[in-house]
């Protein structure tokens, strides 16, 4: 039995104490030693060493092609296939019948026991992927370079679909199953998807969601999609099937040979594996395109260093595959590493607020990767829900998606992890492909501090810059930048390469600007504070305030709108909307409800503002630009600063009154 001892040391800076878990896997290290090792890793050759640990069909001619920045290409000339790395390799080894995915459906019986659990081995998944790849190729003519949309809930058929598409070299785009028909249609159209793969429905919080109905509505506006494959997730849920367009997954599978084998395409390292749409500073989400070789290399590295994954681990990432965390750390990362992992269909509080802890106990989870919102949601219900379960198998905990407040960190560390598991907050984004700043208990563990992201991982040169592009002083708030190219970085923005340059590489010439505010402390630890742009993280879900504004403005009654993020105890941030109505429309509760419903229908429930305020004018400059800065100042109680450009002082007074009203309502 490993000896585990915890020492608590006081920090001098205003960042709280350091926590040293002594002898955790005997990899503890002091900060200066880590930093000196880290300095030696900031070269392409270091990443070449990591890439050499993957199985390539053909090795590269050049590690990094940097002739056309910021369109870097990693491992040029190399060929590989993610489906091969995640499946064939294991099937050829002792892992053939190792359980890859333990899937638990949401419904439970009257004793709270889950009614459906499936354990799929690597060989099971391998066979399904091959049959699916066979059908995609032979029946639907899908080939390398085609784009395919995926709109599926948290069921094993989702990773199976992604791996089948990767196997034949089709570029897929997964759309989160909580997005609306309009959001789905926008993404299918932008990607010019030929085919959509979906399910008839799924369970969420005890309700049946009819996914196919939403997909049908989207398909009316998505002319490029010629065929649809529908997985029957819920046996008795009947949905409309359009002859010649819609096909049942089961029927297709029946039509393929049991032992179908489709050779994995040897894909060039810079082949576009997938497009994932994410919110930015305009109304239209952008399609981040990831490569294959660099992306898989970063995932391999982080699975080892950050998650310390071993063959006897039971790993669980609670994210939804519809977001980047699920792409990287449910599908490609863990499966490539041969993990046994948990996949859960439903809500964390169904039927009770101990569902996650029950699952962790049931399967003996050892590594848990979750979100601050998840932690805060469950923390609210009290320790007794955790204590009811034996969580002694847990050995490593991480969070992602938003800053973790020290209180939530402590609860996760003490109550869930019983003060023996390292707890990290891994910083990364859709654009980065994988984790770039994090504690790395799998390689070397520096002291923990509640709430920090820690030091950049090996091979990543991250810093905090001030407005002038100079490194910020310790403790000074600035902008997070990544100074070197890394494997896993975006290839481009689909259909709009210039936007990649403008959004990420202009503010600090040639360096990747993440769009986050951050502080570096005197130890060099990075603390990401939140977004510096018009992006908000609602329960860890990334949304653009402009998207919500565009949705509101598209309603017939709305003339103008401004949306900002407001701090929320559980969700981190929630959107609040200020709305000016058109002539002939009057504020009413009914109209307010209609607007809430409208946002749900045009984007999805996650984007629904927590409050909608009717105002007669928005604070604007004389040239007509909405001054969101002032709205945010009112909300944060900061001084309004320079208001000389403000056209109409009355507008800001009205916002203040609306905000005071909000504060009394939420008791903040
Ligand atoms: C993986 C993911 C990216 C934004 C990012 C930042 C925030 C993510 C964080 C974090 C503080 C962490 N973020 N992880 N902030 N600490 N550990 O979430 O990707 O959805 O693209 O969001 O999320 O603001 O810029 P994505």
Image: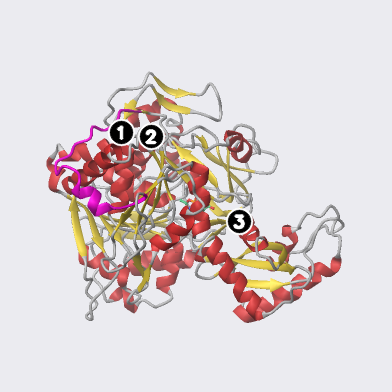
- Which quadrant holds residue 348? bottom left
For the residue pair 664 and 181, the one nearer the viewer reads as 181
SS at circle 1: loop
Q: Is residue 445 visible?
A: no
Residue 589 placed where, x, y %?
Answer: 65, 80
Of the image marks 3 and 2, the number of the one nearer the N terminus: 2
**In the image, 156: left or right of 224?**
left
Judging depth in this view, the residue of 664 and 222 nearest the camera is 222
Q: Could you say where residue 277 lies in the image, as x and y percent from the top left?
A: 50, 47
Q: Which residues are magenta?
A: 245-267
What residue would you read off at disc 3?
Answer: 547
Residue 55's image quarter?
top left
Taking the spot 56% from the left edge, 27% from the top edge, the residue there is: 69
* Residue 320, picture quadrant: bottom left
Disc 3 to disc 1, C-alpha distance? 35 Å
Quadrant containing the N terminus is bottom left
Q: Residue at x 81, y 55 (%)?
A: 624
Asked if the residue at tag 1 contacts the one at tag 2, i.e. Cβ–Cβ closer than 8 Å, the answer is: yes
Q: Is residue 254 magenta?
A: yes
Question: Which residue does the numbered mark 2 point to in the structure image?
Answer: 292
Specify which label sits upstream in the sequence, 3 or 1.
1
Report the disc number at residue 81. Answer: 1
The residues tagged by marks 3 and 2 sit, at their Cα atoms, a distance apart of: 30 Å
Q: Residue at x 46, y 65 (%)?
A: 373
Report the residue at 35% width, 49% height from top: 244
Judging from the image, the colouring scheme is: secondary structure
User: CA separation, marks 2 and 1?
Assistant: 8 Å
Question: Could you say which is closer to the camera, residue 605 or residue 112?
Answer: 605
Residue 621 lies left or right of residue 270; in this view the side is: right
Left or right: 188, with 465 as reference point: left
């Amino acid at each position: 039995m490993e000896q585990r001892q915890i020492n608590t040391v006081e920090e001098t800076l205003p960042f709280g104490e350091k926590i040293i878990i002594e002898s955790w896997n005997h990899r503890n290290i002091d900060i200066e030693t880590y930093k000196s090792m880290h300095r030696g890793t900031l070269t392409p050759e270091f990443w070449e060493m990591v890439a050499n640990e993957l199985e390539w069909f053909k090795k590269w001619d050049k590690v990094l092609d940097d002739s056309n920045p910021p369109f870097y290409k990693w491992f040029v000339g190399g060929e590989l296939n993610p489906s091969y790395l995640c499946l064939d390799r294991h099937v050829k080894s002792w892992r053939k019948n190792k359980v890859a995915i333990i899937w638990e459906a949401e419904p439970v019986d009257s004793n709270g026991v889950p009614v459906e659990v499936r354990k799929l081995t690597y060989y099971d998944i391998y066979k399904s992927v091959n049959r699916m790849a066979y059908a995609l190729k032979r029946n639907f003519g899908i080939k390398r370079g085609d784009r395919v949309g995926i709109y599926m809930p948290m069921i094993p058929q989702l990773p199976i679909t992604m791996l089948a598409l990767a196997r034949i070299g089709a570029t897929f785009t997964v759309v989160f199953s909580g997005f609306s028909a309009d959001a789905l249609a926008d993404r299918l159209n932008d990607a010019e998807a030929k085919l959509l793969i979906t399910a008839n429905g799924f369970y969420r919080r005890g309700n049946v969601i009819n996914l196919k109905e939403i997909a049908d509505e989207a398909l009316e506006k998505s002319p490029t999609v010629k065929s649809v494959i529908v997985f029957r997730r819920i046996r008795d849920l009947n949905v409309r099937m359009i002859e010649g367009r819609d096909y049942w997954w089961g029927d297709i599978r029946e039509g393929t040979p049991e032992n179908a084998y489709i050779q994995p395409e040897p894909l060039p390292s810079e082949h576009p594996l997938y497009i994932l749409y994410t919110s930015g500073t305009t109304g239209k989400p952008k399609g981040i395109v990831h490569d294959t070789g660099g992306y898989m290399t970063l995932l391999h590295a982080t699975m080892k260093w950050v998650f310390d994954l071993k063959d006897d681990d039971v790993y669980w990432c609670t994210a939804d595959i519809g977001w980047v965390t699920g792409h990287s750390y449910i599908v490609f990362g863990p499966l490539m590493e041969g993990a046994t992992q948990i996949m859960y269909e439903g809500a964390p509080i169904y039927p009770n607020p101990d569902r996650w802890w029950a699952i962790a106990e049931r399967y003996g989870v050892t590594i848990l990767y979750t979100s601050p919102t998840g932690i805060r949601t469950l923390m609210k219900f009290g320790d007794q829900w955790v204590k009811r379960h034996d969580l002694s198998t847990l050995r490593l905990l991480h969070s992602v998606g938003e800053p973790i407040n020290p209180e939530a960190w402590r609860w996760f560390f003490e109550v869930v992890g019983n003060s023996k598991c390292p707890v990290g907050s891994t910083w990364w984004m859709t654009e980065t492909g994988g984790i770039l700043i994090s504690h790395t208990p799998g390689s070397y563990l520096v002291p923990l501090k509640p709430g920090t992201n820690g030091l950049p991982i090996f091979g990543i040169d991250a810093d905090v810059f001030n407005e002038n592009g100079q490194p910020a002083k310790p403790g000074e708030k600035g902008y997070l930048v990544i100074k070197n190219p890394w494997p896993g970085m975006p290839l481009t923005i689909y259909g709009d390469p210039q936007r990649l340059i403008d959004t990420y590489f202009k503010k600090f010439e040639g360096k990747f600007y993440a769009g986050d505010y951050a502080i570096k402390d005197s130890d060099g630890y990075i603390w990401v504070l939140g977004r510096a742009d018009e992006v908000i993280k609602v329960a860890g879900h990334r949304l653009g305030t402009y998207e919500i504004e565009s949705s509101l403005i598209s309603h017939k009654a709305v003339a103008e709108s401004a949306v900002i993020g407001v701090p929320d105890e559980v969700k981190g941030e929630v959107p609040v909307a200020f709305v000016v109505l058109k002539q002939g429309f009057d504020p009413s509760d009914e109209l307010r409800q209609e607007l809430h419903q409208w946002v749900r229908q045009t984007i999805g429930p996650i984007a629904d503002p927590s409050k909608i305020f009717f105002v007669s004018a928005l604070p604007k400059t004389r040239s007509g630009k909405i001054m969101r800065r002032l709205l945010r100042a009112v909300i944060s109680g900061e001084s309004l600063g320079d208001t000389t450009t403000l056209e109409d002082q009355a507008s800001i007074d009205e916002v203040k009154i609306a905000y005071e009203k909000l504060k009394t309502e939420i008791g903040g």
